C-alpha cells in the first residue's frame, strides 16, 4: 500500500541488555501521515524499540533512518531537531521549572549561537506555549512548578512539550496511562486533528487497546523483542499468535 | 523571580530589580575605601569579594547545571600558576615575563582551556562520578605542579613581584565580583540559563528535546573555570608567593560548595549570600579557635545537609534552589 519512503524506519534492529535480546531483529517502518500502534505484553521491548528509534539507546546491530537519512549514529538532540519528538513512559519534565518554562525550553532549537541564547524566549515561542497549555487544559497550572503536578498532569505537560517544536512525528509511550477517561477522549481527538489537519505522523505505544483500535491504521505487535504480527487493528485482534501472547497458553 | 517570558511583561522592577539592587550595592562598596577605613579592613572586604566570586562561579556549574564539582579549586590553582609563571623569570626559552594585566586574561584562558579538555570526558559522568573525577583531577594537578619543578618551582614555589596595593586590590576584586554576579544573573534569566537548569533537572529529557547538552555543559564549565582562574591569578599576585600547598588546598573547593549550599544551589543571590555569611562566621565566631576551624566547617556542612538542604533562599521559596543530595542522586537516572 505504501510506495512512499518511510518517515521513520528501523532495519533489522537488535538491542541486547547483557544476554537479553530486548529488541531482536525487528524491521519497522512508519510512513508520513500514518498513525501506527505498537503493542505487546509487558517487557516485550516496546519502550526499548522507542529508545532505539529515537537514539536514546545505541543499537547493537541494524540501521535507523529518519526522513530517508541514516541516523544510526546521530546524536539524539540532532534527531530531535530533524523533527522527531517523543514522550517517555517514565515521565521526564523539569521539576523545578514552571509549566510555562517547561514548555518554552522545549521549543524548536535550530543550533542558534550562544549570543542569541543569552536572551529570554521569543514572544512567538511564548504565544505557542500558552496556546498549547490551553489546548491541554493546563491553563490554571501555567505558573505552577512541574514538580508539583499530579502524574496525569505531568503526562499532559510532557505531551505539550513534545508538541512544542512542531515535530513531524510524535512517539508517545503510554501517553494515556493515568489519565482520566474524558481527557483520554480529548487526547484522542487532538491526535486525530493534528493528523488530519496538519499531517502529523504518530507512533503510539499503548496498553489501551480501544485507543489503538480507534486511532491507528496499522499496528505492530512485539513479543519477547520480536515482531509477532503486523496489520490493521482488526487483523491483529483476530490473530491467534497475538491472542496467545496476551492471554498465555 | 526572574522569568523566561517576554509577552507576560512582568513589571520592570521585577525583571531588572535584582540587577539594580546589585549595582546599587556595588556603588556603595565603591565609596567604602574613602570612608577612612584601614588597609586591613579593605583586605578583609577583598577576601569576601574573592569568596563571593568563587561561590558564584562554582554555582554556575555545580548549582545551575547540576554538576557538583569537588575539584573546582584546580582552576584556581591553574590561574594562580599561570600568573606566577607568566610574570616571573622562569629559566625557559620562552620565558615571557608579562605584566599583571597581560597575564591575567591568559590565566583565565588556561583555566578555561583545561576545563574544555577535562570536561569532555568528565562531564559525561553522572552525579558522584563526576564529583570524584574532578577531585582526582585536582589532586593529580597538585602533584603535576610539584613535579614540574623547572617551570613551577616545585615545592619551593614561586615569588611574584609585589605591585598592587590594598586599594587597587579592593577595586579589582569589586569589579570582578560585580561582573561575575551580574553575568550569572543575566545567564539565569536567559534561555541559556534555562537550558542549564533543564540539564540539571533532566539531562536526557533535555537532549531528547533538541538541546545540545554536551555543548551547554562545556560552555558553563568553561565560564566557571575562566573566572575561577582569574581569581586564582589575582590571589597569586596579592599573596606574592605560591607553592602547591598554599594554592591547591581542598578547603577552597569545600568553601565554594558550602557557600553555594548555604545560600541556595542554583539561585543567583544564594551563593553570594552564603559566602558573606560563612566568611563572617569564620571570622567572628570561630576565628579565635584556630584549631577547630576545619572541624567547625565540617560540622556546619553536616548541619546544612540535615536541616537546610536547599539553603537559605531555597527555604525562603526560591524555586530554582536545589539540594546537594538531589544532584548527586541523579547518577541512577541515566536511563530508565
Ligand atoms: N536499561 C535496561 N537494562 C537492562 N534491561 C533492560 C533495560 N531496559 C529494558 N530492559 C529489559 O528489556 C526488556 C524490554 O523492556 P521494555 O521496557 O522495552 O518493555 P516494554 O514492552 O516497554 O514493557 P512495558 O509494557 O512494561 O512498558 C525487559 O525484559 C526489560 O527488563
Ligand atoms: Mg514500556
Image (tube, coloured by chain):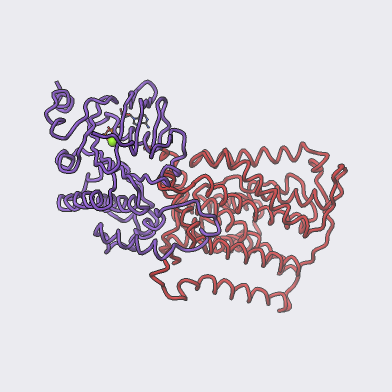
Chain colours: A purple, B red
Quadrant containing the C terminus of chain A is top left
Question: Is the residue A161 above or below the residue A233 in the image?
Answer: below
Question: Viewed as shown, does residue B59 lie left or right of B225?
Answer: left
> Residue at image x 23%, y 50%?
A196
Question: Is the residue B54 above or below the residue B121 in the image?
Answer: below
Residue A14 percent coordinates (x, y) = 37, 25
> Residue at image x 33%, y 61%?
A144
Residue B281 percent coordinates (x, y) = 59, 61
Question: Viewed as shown, does residue A240 lie left or right of B183?
Answer: left
Nearest the eye: B75 or A213: A213
Residue B176 percent coordinates (x, y) = 66, 63
Question: Viewed as shown, does residue A175 lie left or right of A73?
Answer: left
Nearest the eye: A11 or B303: A11
Q: Residue furthest left?
A: A238
Dividing the picture into quadrants, the one containing residue A9 is top left
Quadrant containing the N terminus of chain A is top left
Dividing the picture into quadrants, the one containing residue B33 is bottom right
Residue A136 percent coordinates (x, y) = 25, 57
Ligand 1: quadrant of the figure = top left
> Residue at image x 35%, y 25%?
A12
> Residue at image x 36%, y 59%?
A98
Q: Residue furthest front?
A: A3
Nearest the eye: B21 or A222: A222
Amino acid at each position: 500500500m505504501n510506495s512512499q519512503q518511510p518517515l521513520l524506519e528501523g532495519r533489522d534492529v537488535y538491542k541486547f541488555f547483557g544476554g537479553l535480546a530486548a529488541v531482536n531483529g525487528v524491521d519497522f517502518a512508519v510512513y508520513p501521515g500514518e498513525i501506527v500502534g505498537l503493542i505487546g505484553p509487558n517487557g516485550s521491548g516496546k519502550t526499548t524499540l522507542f529508545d532505539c528509534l529515537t537514539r536514546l539507546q545505541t543499537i547493537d546491530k541494524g540501521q535507523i533512518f529518519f526522513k530517508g537519512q541514516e541516523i544510526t549514529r546521530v546524536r539524539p538532540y540532532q534527531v530531535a531537531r530533524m523533527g522527531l519528538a517523543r514522550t517517555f513512559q517514565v515521565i521526564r519534565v523539569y521539576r523545578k521549572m514552571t509549566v510555562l518554562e517547561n514548555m518554552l525550553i522545549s521549543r524548536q532549537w535550530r543550533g542558534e549561537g550562544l549570543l542569541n541564547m543569552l536572551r529570554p524566549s521569543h514572544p512567538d515561542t511564548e504565544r505557542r506555549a500558552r496556546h498549547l497549555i490551553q489546548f491541554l487544559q493546563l491553563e490554571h497550572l501555567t505558573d505552577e512548578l512541574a514538580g508539583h503536578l499530579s502524574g496525569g498532569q505531568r503526562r499532559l505537560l510532557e505531551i505539550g512539550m513534545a508538541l512544542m517544536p512542531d515535530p513531524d512525528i510524535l512517539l508517545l509511550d503510554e501517553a494515556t496511562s493515568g489519565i482520566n477517561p474524558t481527557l483520554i477522549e480529548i487526547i484522542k481527538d487532538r491526535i486525530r486533528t493534528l493528523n488530519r489537519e496538519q499531517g502529523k505522523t504518530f507512533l503510539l505505544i499503548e496498553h489501551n487497546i480501544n485507543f489503538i483500535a480507534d486511532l491507528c491504521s496499522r499496528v505492530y505487535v512485539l513479543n519477547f523483542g520480536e515482531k509477532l504480527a503486523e496489520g490493521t487493528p482488526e487483523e491483529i485482534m483476530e490473530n491467534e499468535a497475538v491472542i496467545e501472547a496476551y492471554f498465555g497458553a | 523571580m526572574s522569568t523566561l517570558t517576554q509577552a507576560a511583561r512582568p513589571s520592570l522592577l521585577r525583571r531588572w530589580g535584582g540587577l539594580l539592587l546589585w549595582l546599587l550595592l556595588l556603588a556603595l562598596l565603591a565609596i567604602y575605601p574613602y570612608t577612612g577605613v584601614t588597609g586591613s579592613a579593605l583586605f578583609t572586604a577583598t577576601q569576601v569579594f574573592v569568596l563571593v566570586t568563587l561561590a558564584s562561579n562554582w554555582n554556575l556549574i555545580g548549582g545551575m547545571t547540576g554538576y557538583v564539582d569537588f575539584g573546582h579549586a584546580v582552576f584556581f590553582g591553574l590561574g594562580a600558576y599561570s600568573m606566577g609563571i607568566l610574570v616571573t623569570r622562569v629559566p625557559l626559552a620562552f620565558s615571557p615575563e608579562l605584566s599583571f594585566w597581560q597575564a591575567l586574561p591568559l590565566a583565565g584562558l588556561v583555566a578555561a582551556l583545561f576545563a574544555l579538555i577535562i570536561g569532555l570526558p568528565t562531564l559525561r559522568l553522572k552525579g558522584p562520578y563526576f564529583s570524584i573525577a574532578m577531585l582526582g583531577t585536582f589532586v593529580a594537578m597538585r602533584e603535576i605542579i610539584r613535579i614540574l619543578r623547572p617551570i613551577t618551582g616545585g615545592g619551593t614555589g614561586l615569588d611574584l613581584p609585589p605591585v598592587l596595593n590594598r586599594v587597587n586590590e579592593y577595586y579589582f576584586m569589586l569589579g570582578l565580583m560585580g561582573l561575575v554576579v551580574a553575568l550569572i544573573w543575566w545567564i539565569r534569566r536567559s534561555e541559556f540559563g534555562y537550558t542549564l537548569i533543564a540539564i540539571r533537572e533532566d539531562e536526557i529529557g533535555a537532549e531528547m528535546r533538541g538541546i545540545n547538552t554536551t555543548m551547554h555543559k562545556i560552555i558553563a564549565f568553561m565560564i566557571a573555570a575562566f573566572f575561577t582562574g582569574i581569581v586564582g591569578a589575582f590571589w597569586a599576585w596579592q599573596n606574592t608567593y605560591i607553592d602547591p600547598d598554599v594554592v591547591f588546598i581542598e578547603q577552597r573547593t569545600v568553601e565554594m560548595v558550602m557557600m553555594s549550599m548555604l545560600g541556595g544551589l542554583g539561585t543567583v543571590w544564594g551563593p553570594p549570600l552564603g559566602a558573606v555569611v560563612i566568611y563572617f562566621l569564620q571570622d567572628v565566631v570561630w576565628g579565635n579557635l584556630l584549631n577547630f576551624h576545619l572541624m567547625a566547617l565540617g560540622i556546619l556542612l553536616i548541619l546544612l545537609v540535615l536541616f537546610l538542604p536547599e539553603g537559605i533562599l531555597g527555604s525562603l521559596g526560591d524555586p530554582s534552589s536545589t539540594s546537594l543530595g538531589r544532584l548527586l542522586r541523579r547518577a541512577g537516572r541515566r536511563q530508565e
